[in-house]
Image: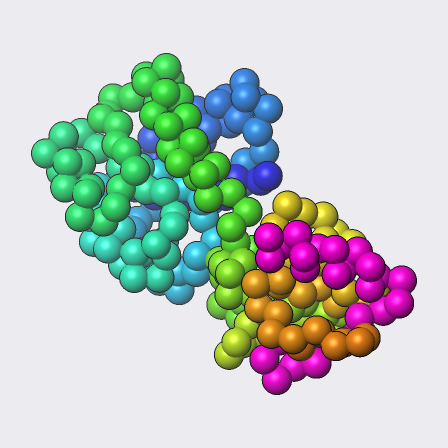
């Protein structure tokens, strides 16, 4: 898993320090991380989309303080782990108001930072792969797997279908199948993956999700039916 980590900090010294700490922790623990840096809360929240696993948030910033930014983030994203980094403990203790996972006080030594980050990542791992990160018009969306109805290939694109929305992505169905391994998703046809929790009817060579009728190929019928029976146990 690639962890998406945002650092929201207005002082360049601390921006560089926290990037260094995150990279060191990732190297020591054999993790993959992608780090995005925002110099102010406003830079994070304008056009925010739910693409991050962890936000390391300073509280005192010039244009939009960390507490305000966290409240705005929570309007769009209930799952992201927020860790406040501040010089004032009394500010950080208000983190429960926005569901903060943890906080750490400046100045920050690496050992203390690593301990706190490990706790935050354990929180993230509990939710690992409960969602897909999909490209959206204004960035990326975090889509809950429980909201996905089915996924199909159309003209070399994957279409991820939700009840009232769909996403088009450049990905192979094989790679998507691997990403969904261990979840209640199964391929019923060479070009279709269905969410077993959304199946409403199974025909001779079809499967229905509400009003949508999808094919079940001969070669995949047996493993598909076995997966359905296992899911319904």
Task: Point out residue 42 in the picture as x, y percentages from the top left corner.
Answer: 30, 56
Task: Judge by depth and name the residue closer to the eye, 62 or 168.
Answer: 168
Q: Residue at x 79, y 56 (%)?
A: 223
Residue 203 makes an appearance in the image: yes
Task: Point out residue 47 in the picture as x, y percentages from the top left corner.
Answer: 40, 64
Task: Point out residue 17 in the picture as x, y percentages from the top left corner.
Answer: 39, 26
In this view, 153 is above or below 102: below
Image quarter of residue 121: top left
Q: Which image quarter holds the N terminus? A: top right
In this view, 44 is above or below 165: above
Q: Is residue 39 magenta?
A: no
Q: Which residues are magenta?
A: 209-233
In this view, 47 is above or below 91: below
The colour scheme of the drawn protein is rainbow
Q: Is residue 14 left or right of residue 97?
A: right
Task: Judge by depth and name the residue closer to the eye, 230 or 87.
Answer: 230
Residue 62 makes an appearance in the image: no
Image quarter of residue 190: bottom right
Q: Residue furthest left?
A: 90
Task: Point out residue 21 in the picture as x, y percentages from the top left corner.
Answer: 43, 24
Task: Judge by depth and name the residue closer to the eye, 84 or 76.
Answer: 76
What is the number of callouts on the image? 0
Image quarter of residue 152: bottom right
Q: Is residue 210 magenta?
A: yes
In this view, 178 is above or below 204: above
Task: Judge by depth and name the residue closer to the eye, 68 or 131.
Answer: 131
Q: Residue at x 77, y 65 (%)?
A: 188
Q: Residue at x 26, y 42 (%)?
A: 100
């Amino acid at each position: 898993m690639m962890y998406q980590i945002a650092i929201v900090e207005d002082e360049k010294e601390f921006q560089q320090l926290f990037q260094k700490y995150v990279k060191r922790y990732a190297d020591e623990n054999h993790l993959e991380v992608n780090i995005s840096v925002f110099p102010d809360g406003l830079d994070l929240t304008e056009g925010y989309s739910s693409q991050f696993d962890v936000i390391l948030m300073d509280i005192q910033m010039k244009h939009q303080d960390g507490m305000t930014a966290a409240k705005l983030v929570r309007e769009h994203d209930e799952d992201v782990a927020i860790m406040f980094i501040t010089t004032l403990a009394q500010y950080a203790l208000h983190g429960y108001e926005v569901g903060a996972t943890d906080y750490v006080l400046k100045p920050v030594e690496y050992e203390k930072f690593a301990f706190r980050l490990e706790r935050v990542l354990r929180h993230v791992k509990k939710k690992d792969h409960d969602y897909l990160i999909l490209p959206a018009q204004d960035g990326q969306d975090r889509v809950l797997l429980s909201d996905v109805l089915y996924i199909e290939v159309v003209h070399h694109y994957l279409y991820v279908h939700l009840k009232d929305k769909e996403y088009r992505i450049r990905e192979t169905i094989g790679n998507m199948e691997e990403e969904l391994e261990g979840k209640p998703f199964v391929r019923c046809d060479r070009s279709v993956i269905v969410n077993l929790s959304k199946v409403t009817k199974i025909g001779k060579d079809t499967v229905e999700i509400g009003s949508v009728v999808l094919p079940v190929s001969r070669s995949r019928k047996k493993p598909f039916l076995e997966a359905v029976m296992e899911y319904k146990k």
